[in-house]
Amino acid sequence: MRSPWNEQAVLIDAEYASLFAPALPPETRLRCRHEGDPASAVAALLAMVRQRRPRWRNRLHVWLGYPWAQGQLLPWQPGMPGGDSHWRGYAQALLRERGMVGEWRVRLGAARHGRARLAVAADANLLDRLQRAVSESGWAMAGCRDLLSASLERYRRPLRQLGKCLVLAEAGAMTCVWQSPEGWDDMITLQLAPGQPPTSGVAAAEALCGRPIAAGYGWASTLSPQQSPAPPQARWLGFPHPMLGGQSCSG
């Protein structure tokens, strides 16, 4: 039976907005350089896609990568008052220490007493502009997710069997997240130079965080194995979400 939905997914990274139907391989995606204005780029891409009637059938799923969405580890603070509002303020303070000025909307991970907490911050101005641009283009925004939390959620089971480290490789950046049975241990995001492969950042991340070279870790990426092969010591898990294309590890 034909789906009633006309669904598209858009991935916004450091340089490009890429639009593609979830059922098609990543190589078929339409993309354009956004020049720092992803909302306008998304509107231009949507203008190239045929819509279905009625209007409510047209849905867009948005995926945010670096630098529009970034993770932040929140070390446990025993004196922190209860309530997520205080944790969001804590996250905002740590983001400012990293030089991330402006307004950021913070999504908090699950809280465990005495353990570090993971937060993801998204550029609030971009979110507002995207919502307007998508609506004015005749589409509905079905959801907006960041790549990091999507990867951690999708590959929770295989990560238990590996060295408790996930590498998220994307165009322009790579992120390493370490965890233990007690919870989150550490994380780091490194910006990559133009043309620099994500594999080159793993050793630097391990050195900066004082981590021994991992015997094995999980590798999730917005780039296919053909575009950016994972190193020998990594296990290719797949894309952060099935909508982003390709085959992925099932568990």
Image (cartoon, grey):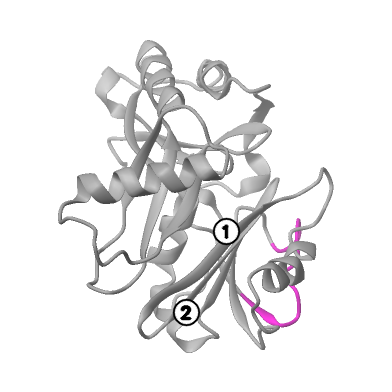
The structure residue drawn at horizontal position 56% and vertical position 45%, both measured from the top left corner, is 98
Q: Which residues are magenta?
A: 225-235
Q: Which mark is residue 159?
A: 2
Q: Is residue 9 above or below residue 103?
A: below
Quadrant occupied by the C terminus: bottom left
Q: Quadrant of residue 201?
A: bottom right
Residue type (three-letter) at the residue carrying disc 1: Gly
Labels in figure, total: 2
Q: Is residue 3 above or below residue 159?
A: above
- Placement of 219 over or under 36, stated as above or below: below
**32 relative position to 186: left or right:** right
Lower sequence index among marks 1 and 2: 2
The kind of residue on which mark 2 rests is: Leu
Q: Is residue 230 magenta?
A: yes
Percent across and percent down for residue 97 are: 52, 44
CA separation in Å, label 1 and label 2: 19 Å
SS at mark 1 in the image: loop
Any mark on residue 56, and which? none
Is residue 1 in view? no
Callout 2 secondary element: helix
Any part of residue 133 in sight: yes
Predominant secondary structure in magenta? loop
Q: Residue at x 51, y 69 (%)?
A: 186
Residue 27 appears left or right of 9: right
Query: Residue 135 placed where, x, y %?
Result: 35, 16
Question: Would you say 209 lies left or right of 229 here?
Answer: left
